[in-house]
Amino acid sequence: MSVKIKHYPGEEIETQDFREGKVLFESFKPKAKYAWSAGIAISRFLEELKNGRILASTCSKCKRIMVPPRIYCEKCFKPTDGWTYVKDTGTINTFSVSFIAADASRLKEPIVVAIINLDGASEGMGIVHWLNEYGDWREIKIGMRVKAVWKPPEERVGAITDIKYFKPIKE
Amino acid sequence: MFGKKRVAIVGAGVTLFRRNLKETGKELAYHAAKMALEQAGMELHDIQSVVVGSAPDAFDGVHMKGEYLADGAGAYHKPYMRVFVGGATGVFAPLAGWWHVASGKFDTCLVVCEEKMSSCYPHPQYAFTTIFDPILERPIGMNLIWIFALEMNRYMHKHNIKKEDIALVSVKNKRNALDNPIAQLAANITVEDVLNSEIMAWPVQRLDVSPTSDGAAAVVLVSEDVAKEVTDNPVWIDGVGWCIDSTHWTNRDLYYPDYVEYAARMAYKMAGIKNPPKEIDVAEPYDPFDYKELHHMEGLLLCKKGEAPKLTREGVTQRDGDLPVCPSGGLLGVGNPISAAGLMKVCEIFWQLRGEAGKRQVPGDPRTGVAQAWGDLMQYSSVIVLRR
């Protein structure tokens, strides 16, 4: 983008040129599958979700109560040295009302996702989850109080989705 | 002076930025690298080391992108490395190039950034789903736009910022891009156009967002000795900074990017800049979304927290304002081939400081400029301060 440059290389084509065979191409669809161990801290966290409880880890040096829990404090760089439960109620830190799915395809009904600061955890310690039973999405506000809606105990498998979603509450 | 040698940029090159380009990534890298060498009046045999920047391999579906791009980037039989720090790669790559020369190990380094996002179907956004934590976040179906929307909403809430003010950034940058010969989405649009565009993930709407793109960019870095031989108007890399925040992004207050501030302070300290708004003549902060330009102006200490919308509304950030921001047209107007977009910003500052920006030239004979990129999980920032 200099006045000394008169020509910029690049030959534009259209996405439909692939479908219509106007450009030569090869295609490939990966079939790899993965299974991740949940690790030391998050395995305990997931086990407790089965019991309907939200587990945090604590650092005796910086005094933080951290959720999601971890086995090391990233600030003090030492092992966390305690476990505690936090509440399943909290406050909306921020939220989004999404009309697009993960592949950018369009949704008829929006998904609402929020960062929820959980009661009992250190300030600003949020987790990301869905919000539901909110009525009109335009009425959702940062600072609203919410509570977890759990799956019935027999349906819990030890996953973040053992919490079905959070819903607004009046206190 | 930091390092053993002062480092200058002496040439820059870019390809067109487009949604789809027929050229392969290697071919794009070649075109940008060749143009940068020609502009520097140098040949490949003058180049002692090569750095390539490219963002997630999943876009190209080529899982050795550094090696894949090597020949096109001019790395044949040379010391070579690829760097990757997410969206911050495009400004990080010339920082890595700076180490090569400032350390005294090399007198010259060719830095090339390439991105080809069009290869991923049905939409490259799907490749981004794999950046999230596999246990706690992917089961929620996280997508990239969501995290921007969460951050934008928090920023708006904290400072009581209106969407109208944020939309002004999109209007400005797309208009600036009308004077940019490589731009993909140059347009004259209005605030109403932005506010009436499709809601993607509230508060993010269609015209708040930069496009996906193919493209490449390159710069030639040389030591002071070589700079004196090849040019009368080198542009010096006087400040470099970079920083990462915690990957526990749901534990951070997203209203302010303090990791950007840390990277900026590091670069300003090195450049001897004490009052950034006064001492910086032109800025290219990373603007993949319109609110990000504002967020990054604040992180770069170009204004106080929450003040960037006001400066934008008052016209301070227009090309003829007191502090021109994204005179190139930014990612919103020029396009967003991720790493190439970041390096394009460095190229723009280079050309602005040399007075070669033509219709985009900011007035007032600018001497000092800053470019910045941002990436990973809203946590990484790379900052470069250039001076002539």
Image (spheres, coloured by chain):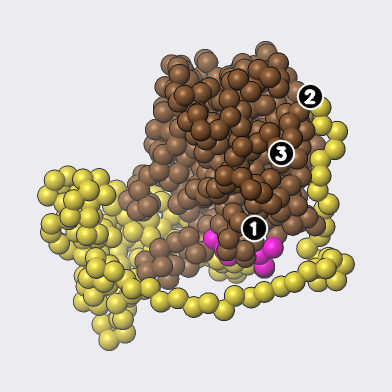
Of all residues, the one furthest to the top in this rendering is B364
Q: Residue type at mark 3?
A: Leu
Where residue B364 appears, as percent x and y from the top left, is 67, 13
The tally of labels here is 3
Q: CA distance from mark 2 to mark 1?
A: 35 Å
What's the residue at 17%, 44% (across, down)?
A62
Which of the two discs, 2 and 1, sits closer to the camera? Answer: 1
Where residue B192 appears, as percent x and y from the top left, is 68, 42
> In which quadrant of the rendered view does residue A154 lie?
bottom left
**Chain letter for yellow?**
A
Residue A20 placement, left or right of B368: right
Mark sitting on residue B44: 3
Q: Between disc 1 and disc 3, whose residue precedes?
A: 3
Tell me the subunit letter for badge 1.
Answer: B
Q: Which residue is mark 1?
A: B68
Q: Which range of residues does the magenta coloring cover? A: B119-128
Q: Which residue is mark 2?
A: B358
| In contact (CB < 8 Å): disc 3 and disc 2 | no
Q: CA distance from mark 3 to mark 2?
A: 28 Å
Tell which of A85 and B74 is nearer to you: B74
Tell me the subunit letter for badge 3.
Answer: B
Tell which of B80 and B149 is nearer to you: B80
Tell which of A111 and B185 is nearer to you: B185
Q: Between disc 3 and disc 2, whose residue precedes?
A: 3
What's the residue at 51%, 23% (across, down)?
B5
Residue B255 makes an appearance in the image: yes
Q: CA distance from mark 1 to mark 3?
A: 19 Å
In magenta stretch: residue B143: no
Tell me the subunit letter for badge 2.
Answer: B
**Chain letter for brown?**
B
Q: Crowding at label 3, few (<14), some or many (≥20) Cα neighbours within 10 Å?
A: some
